[in-house]
Amino acid sequence: MTPQSAPIVSEQDFPVSGEIVWKAITDKHLMQQWFFEQITDFEPRPGFETEFSVRCEGKEYLHQWNVTEVIPSQKISYGWKYGGCVGDSTVQWEIQETQDGTKLTLTHVCHEPFPQDDPLMSRESCQAGWNYFLHES
């Protein structure tokens, strides 16, 4: 991913309340079930920082998150970096109640390019990952 790339956006409608979706994206125990089981801690409050390691295709990726914005039951944003790698991005989750439940919109914006020689950090890989998390996991 590079800053010149358009943000990655993935949306999914869920036939449940916004409160249930909010809990799914902010409660550590629920996040471990559908997002990253390696998450060691998470709190939906500005300034909260966490890191955890994920092994993928034989390589370790140290995920580093810093919560930057929280509007309870509506929006949470956090900085997303990888330890030992260049690159910086922001992930934002927005919740919108609909007639049939809740729409969850994920927006991933790159601020500083990630390593271009790592296929798992390509735009295509990131888009596929977000689509997997929102539509399948």
Image (cartoon, grey):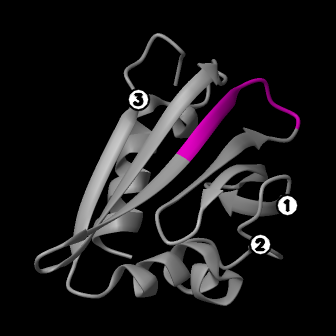
Q: Label 1, on which residue?
A: 50
Residue at the image point whose x is 85% and y is 52% from the top: 47
Which numbered circle lies on residue 2? none
Measure the C-alpha gap from mark 1 to mark 2.
Answer: 7 Å
Q: Tell me where residue 3 appears, x and y as whole percent.
A: 54, 15
Judge from the rendering whether residue 108 lies leftward or rightward of residue 79; answer left or right. left
Residue 117 position (above or below residue 99): above
Callout 2, which amino acid?
Phe
The residue that appears at 20% across and 85% down in the rendered structure is: 15
Residue 48: image quadrant is bottom right
SS class, disc 1? strand
Mark 1 and 2 residues: CB-CB less than 8 Å, in contact? Answer: yes
**The magenta stretch spans residue 89:** yes
Q: Residues within 10 Å of mark 2 (few under 14, many from 20)?
A: some
Q: Which mark is residue 7?
A: 3
* Part of the protein shown in magenta: 84-91
Q: Amino acid at mark 3?
A: Pro
Nearer to us in this view, 39 or 115: 39
Q: Earlier in the sequence, mark 3 or mark 1?
A: 3
- Which residue position is annotated with label 2? 42
Quarter-of-image position of residue 81: top right
* x, y percent for residue 20: 43, 87
Q: Name the amino acid type tagged 1.
A: Thr
Taking the image as shown, residue 7 lies to the left or right of residue 35, namely left
For the residues bearing labels 3 and 1, Cβ distance under 8 angstroms? no
Return the x and y of residue 32 as percentages of the image width and height: 63, 82
View extreme (front): residue: 71
Q: Is 119 above or below relative to 59?
A: above
Residue 20 drawn above or below residue 131? below
Res. 22 in view:
yes
Which residue occupies the foreground of this view, 11 or 131? Answer: 11
